[in-house]
């Protein structure tokens, strides 16, 4: 069994995979990171693990984790089953690498656009030749709400809410429309841009805001909150066979 750890900007997701199937997936408080991992290791017979970290995992914690499990720390130098044509491959986020691997695995020989709606919204494109061309990075929904509050004197901080009308007739409704409707229109617009250039486009939506956004998008998409975890597991499998 494989231990999959995705340490994102705001949370840690941990999963156990048996071959290509997820057995368990949980969210872990970063303060309880190692103790919760130890519980999982006692529960399952883990043979290998992989860590994707974009933010807070210290070198000390990584070293302790390496003593507990045969660990691969994902980086730009890790062997992956796609051709990376990114101009600056060393700056490509490890989370984006894992998403592309999941796309190549699940939608082989297809043009795939991956929308990861989390702290940031990332757009990643891999073509039908398994070539990663790049994409885009945009502020996520929560970040947009916080930015409006932080960079102004009077705008309130609000919770995510679907606007009843795209024309806001009070401040709160105007903020909700600007943020949520703005994100929806952005996603739809980017999808259409790619569809005009690439035929038979497959679109995958993932990330923390998947469930909220999937209901609002008119474009045909595949929603999968665990897409990154699947990609990380596939990286382990790919390197085991090397």
Image: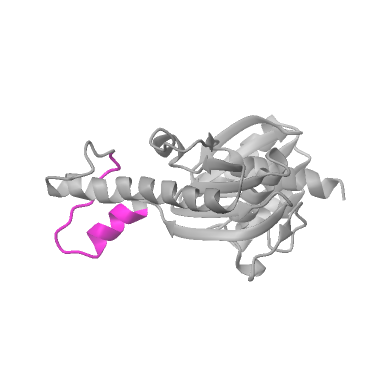
Q: Please tell me whether residue 84 is drawn above or below residue 42 in the rendered image.
A: below
Left or right of residue 13: residue 80 = right
| Residue 145 in sight from this viewpoint | yes
- Quadrant hosting residue 218: top left
Q: Please tell me whether residue 83 is drawn above or below residue 234 in the rendered image.
A: below
Spot occupied by residue 128 in the image (x, y as percentages of width and height): 70, 49
**Residue drawn 17% across the image and 45% down it:** 168
- Quadrant hosting residue 224: top right
Left or right of residue 217: residue 174 = left
- Quadrant hosting residue 109: top right
Q: 11 or 77, which is in the foreground?
A: 77
Left or right of residue 108: residue 137 = left
Residue stretch in magenta: 143-161
**Residue drawn 51% across the image and 48% down it:** 116
Spot occupied by residue 189 in the image (x, y as percentages of width and height): 42, 50
85 drawn magenta: no
Spot occupied by residue 76 in the image (x, y as percentages of width and height): 69, 63
Quadrant assignment for the N terminus: top right
Spot occupied by residue 72 in the image (x, y as percentages of width and height): 73, 53
Q: Please tell me whether residue 185 is drawn above or below residue 155 in the rendered image.
A: above
Q: Residue reaching furthest left?
A: 170
């Amino acid at each position: 069994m494989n231990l999959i750890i995705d340490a994102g900007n705001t949370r840690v997701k941990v999963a156990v995979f048996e071959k290509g199937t997820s057995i368990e997936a949980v969210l872990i408080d970063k303060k309880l990171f190692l103790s919760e991992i130890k519980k999982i290791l006692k529960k399952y017979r883990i043979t290998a693990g992989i860590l994707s970290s974009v933010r807070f995992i210290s070198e000390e914690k990584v070293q302790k984790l390496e003593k507990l499990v045969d660990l691969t720390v994902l980086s730009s130098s890790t062997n992956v089953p796609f051709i990376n044509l990114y101009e600056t491959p060393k700056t490509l986020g490890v989370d984006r690498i894992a998403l592309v691997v999941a796309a190549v695995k699940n939608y082989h020989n297809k043009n795939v656009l991956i929308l990861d709606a989390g702290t940031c919204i990332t757009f990643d494109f891999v073509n039908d030749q398994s070539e990663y061309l790049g994409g885009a990075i945009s502020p996520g929904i929560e970040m947009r709400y916080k930015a409006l509050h932080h960079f102004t004197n009077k705008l309130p901080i609000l919770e995510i809410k679907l606007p009843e009308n795209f024309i806001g007739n009070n401040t709160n409704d105007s903020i909700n429309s600007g943020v949520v409707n703005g994100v929806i229109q952005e996603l739809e617009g980017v999808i259409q841009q790619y569809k005009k250039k690439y035929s038979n486009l497959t679109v995958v939506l993932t990330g923390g805001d998947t469930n909220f956004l999937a209901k609002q998008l008119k474009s045909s998409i595949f929603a999968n909150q665990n897409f990154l975890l699947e990609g990380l597991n596939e990286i382990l499998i790919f390197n085991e066979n090397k």
